[in-house]
Image (cartoon, grey):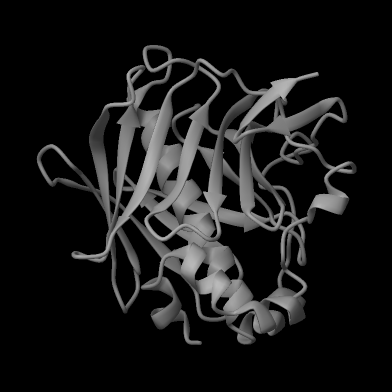
């Protein structure tokens, strides 16, 4: 499947219809049996929650905040395009373009332009879902995305690489027909700045579709082989995940 075609298809549908190809690809994130070696980080159950739904009629993702009563308030609309940049993000309120994401045909890195500023999602490993970048919202602090997976859920955990503090988690349901997944932030809506929220949503969804493409495009095997993974800055960019955390029901909690 070509990169352009894959970028048009919601992640859970690509994965579920390409199980044979996925089984042959060494870039699949850690399975449930490996979670004991790299468990995800504890996140608050009272933090900001965003829900990502795929709109079949308009072929786009809608990201909405979820209130205490379950009501949804649309915040972002993410469009798919056949050519680079394949992902385009706009505010749901006034349809202002705020960002774009690029998925490369050969390179396993991902590129984002958020409010006119470039973010490069650089892999930490060739064959595992571990990426890092320099966060403009956090003043140039290195931030990492690390993934764990089960047969149903693909979790991406975003952490501050310098302090090892959790920022958010994107939990994706592979088999859902409409609800792509949810973002769970460590802090409440009042505590999360708009710039950080924008950055987490845009880098998280871009990485999701980068990995979906990697799992369905054999050319990325060569891209991974020739990649130069590593930390974006200094010794603090490498993220590690504590061994005393476990997942539960789409949220993360301390044991």
Quarter of the image containing the C terminus? top right
Q: Is residue 108 above or below residue 138?
A: below
Q: Is residue 145 left or right of residue 185?
A: right
Residue at (55, 21) in percent of width and height:
186
Residue at (71, 74) in percent of width and height:
224
Nearer to the camera, 88 or 186:
186
Q: How many dots with numbers? A: 0
Residue at (77, 59) in percent of width and height:
125
Residue at (50, 47) in percent of width and height:
204
Q: Quadrant of residue 249?
A: top right
Q: Residue furthest top?
A: 190
Q: Is residue 182 above or below residue 193?
A: below
Q: Position of residue 74 (x, y in %)?
A: 23, 37
Q: Quadrant of residue 122?
A: bottom right
Q: Position of residue 22 (x, y in %)?
A: 68, 76
Nearer to the camera, 248 or 243:
248
Q: Is residue 95 left or right of residue 141?
A: left
Q: Is residue 147 above or below residue 241?
A: below
Q: Is residue 152 left or right of residue 41?
A: left
Residue 152 visible, this angle? yes
Q: Position of residue 115 (x, y in %)?
A: 29, 43
Residue 163 visible, this angle? no
């Amino acid at each position: 499947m070509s990169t352009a075609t894959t970028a048009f298809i919601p992640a859970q549908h690509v994965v579920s219809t390409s199980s044979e190809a996925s089984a042959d690809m060494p870039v699949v994130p850690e399975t449930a049996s490996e979670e004991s070696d790299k468990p995800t980080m504890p996140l608050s159950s009272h933090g900001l929650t965003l829900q990502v739904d795929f709109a079949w009629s308009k072929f786009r993702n809608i990201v909405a905040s979820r209130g205490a009563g379950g009501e949804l308030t649309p915040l972002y609309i993410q469009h798919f395009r056949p050519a680079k940049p394949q992902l385009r993000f706009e505010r749901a309120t006034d349809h202002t373009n705020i960002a774009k994401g690029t998925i490369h045909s050969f390179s396993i890195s991902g590129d984002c332009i958020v409010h006119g500023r470039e973010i490069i999602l650089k892999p930490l490993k060739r064959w595992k879902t571990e990426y890092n970048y320099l966060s403009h919202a956090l003043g140039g602090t290195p931030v990492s995305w690390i993934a764990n997976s089960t047969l149903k859920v693909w979790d991406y955990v975003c952490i501050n690489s310098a302090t090892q503090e959790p920022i958010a988690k994107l939990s994706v349901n592979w088999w859902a027909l409409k609800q792509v997944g949810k973002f769970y932030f460590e802090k409440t809506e009042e505590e999360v700045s708009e710039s950080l929220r924008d950055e987490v949503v845009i880098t998280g969804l871009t990485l999701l579709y980068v990995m979906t493409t990697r799992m369905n495009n054999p050319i990325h095997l060569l891209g991974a082989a020739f990649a130069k993974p590593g930390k974006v800055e200094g010794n603090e960019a490498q993220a590690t995940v504590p061994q005393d955390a476990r997942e539960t029901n789409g949220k993360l909690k301390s044991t």
